[in-house]
Amino acid sequence: MADWPEKLDGFVAQHSEDYARKRVDYLGVNIGGDEPLFKIYYLNDYTLTFSEGRPSSLLDLLRERDMIRFLTLAEDTGGRRRFRYDIGLKRRTDDNMEALFAWLNEHVSIFSRQEAEIRTLAAMPICDARAFPLAGMHFLGFVSEDDRVTALKCHYLCRRHRDVSTPPRLGRYDSGYFLTWLEQSGIPAMERLCPLVRDVLGCCGGDVCMVGTDYWLTGERKYKIYITGPIFLYQGLAEALGREQDPLLLRQVEELMAWDDAHPRFYCPILALALDDRDRLTMNFYYRET
C-alpha cells in the first residue's frame, strides 16, 4: 500500500482539536493525481468567527447585500497561509447576481476570462417558473492570498425547486434531467463527464446533487459533478473505473477503501467526479464523522 494513507492519518491528527471542538464539517480527500490532497472544511459558525477582521473585499460586498446564507473555511495540505472560502448564496435575485458578477468582472481576472461559461451554468433551470435566470449558482468559493483571488470556484445545486425562494434542501433530485441539460450545454468537459457519472450512478447508486467549476489564475480549469447518497461506493467505483481503464485511480480507490475500513469513525455521503482542462479524471471524497 502507498504511504499516502499514513499522511492522511497525520493530517487528521493535526486537526484533532478541531474535531474535539466540533468545528469540522467535512474531511476532503482528492485522488487521481500523483499525490492525493486532503482538506478540512469548517462549519459555518466557526468560519464566520474566523473571517471577522480578515480582509476580503468580496465578502464585504456579499455582506452588504445580505447574500451570505452560510460561510465555510477550508484548509488544505498546502498550509495555513492561504484562505479558502465556500459561500452559500441567498437572495439570488437578478439585481444581486448582476452586482456580484459586475464586481467579479472588475476585480477578478479569472471571472473575466470565464464569464460566458459561468453565466451558462448559472442559467441552468432549477425552477418550474423560469424567473431569476442566474439563480442556478448556489455557492461561490475562492482562494485568497493577501486579499487577491487566485482561484474561483463556482457551484450549482442540482435540485428542482418550485421557485427561487425554496430552501435548497427542499428541492428534489432529478439526475437524468440535469445530466441531459449539462450534455447539451456546449461545455465539452461536461459532455465528456456526464456518461462517466451515469456509469457511476448505475454502479454505486445515489443522485446528482451539484455541479462545480474551478478556475485558477494560472489558467487551469476543473469541472466536477457531485453524487450524494452512494450505496455501493468503493465496489461500484471499481466496476465503473474498470470500464475507464484508469489503473492509478483504481488503485487509489482501493487504498482509500482500505483506509475507510480501518477508520469506522468516518463515512462518505458525497463524492465528485472531476475532469481538468487536460481531460484527466480525478475524484473527491467528502467524509463526515459517524
Image (cartoon, rainbow, N blue to C red):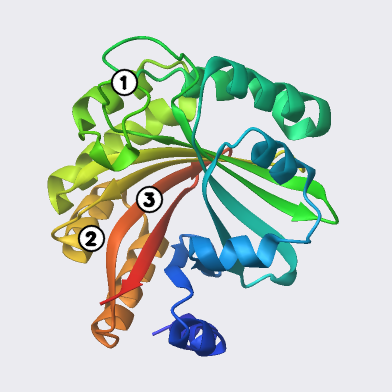
- First-in-chain label (3 vs 2): 2
Image quarter hosting the C terminus: bottom left
Left or right: residue 129 versus residue 204 is right
Examine the image and state in which quarter residue 271 appears. Answer: bottom left
Left or right: residue 213 versus residue 166 is right
Disc number lying in front (2 or 1): 1
Q: Secondary structure at mark 3?
A: strand
Left or right: residue 257 versus residue 32 is left
Residue at the (50%, 60%) spot, across then down: 44
Outermost right residue = 146
Residue at the (14%, 49%) spot, across then down: 205
Q: Nearer the viewer, residue 39 or 200?
A: 39
- Vertical position of residue 116 compared to residue 1: above or below: above
- First-in-chain label (1 vs 3): 1
Residue type (three-letter) at the residue carrying disc 1: Asp
Q: Position of residue 98 (x, y in %)?
A: 64, 18
Q: Position of residue 40 (x, y in %)?
A: 52, 70
According to the picture, the residue beneath numbered tag 3 turns out to be: 272
Examine the image and state in which quarter residue 2 appears. Answer: bottom left
- Vertical position of residue 133 compared to residue 47: above or below: above
Badge number at residue 238? 2
Outermost top residue = 130
According to the picture, the residue beneath numbered tag 1 turns out to be: 163
Residue type (three-letter) at the residue carrying disc 2: Ala
Q: Nearer the viewer, residue 138 or 246?
A: 138
Q: Nearer the viewer, residue 21 or 220?
A: 21
Q: Position of residue 142 (x, y in %)?
A: 66, 47
Neighbourhood count class around disc 1 (C-alpha, 10 Å): few under 14, some 14–19, many 20 upward: some
Task: Please give the count of numbered marks on the rendered protein.
Answer: 3
Gap in angstroms between the C-alphas marked 2 and 1: 39 Å
Q: Secondary structure at mark 2?
A: helix
Residue type (three-letter) at the residue carrying disc 3: Ala
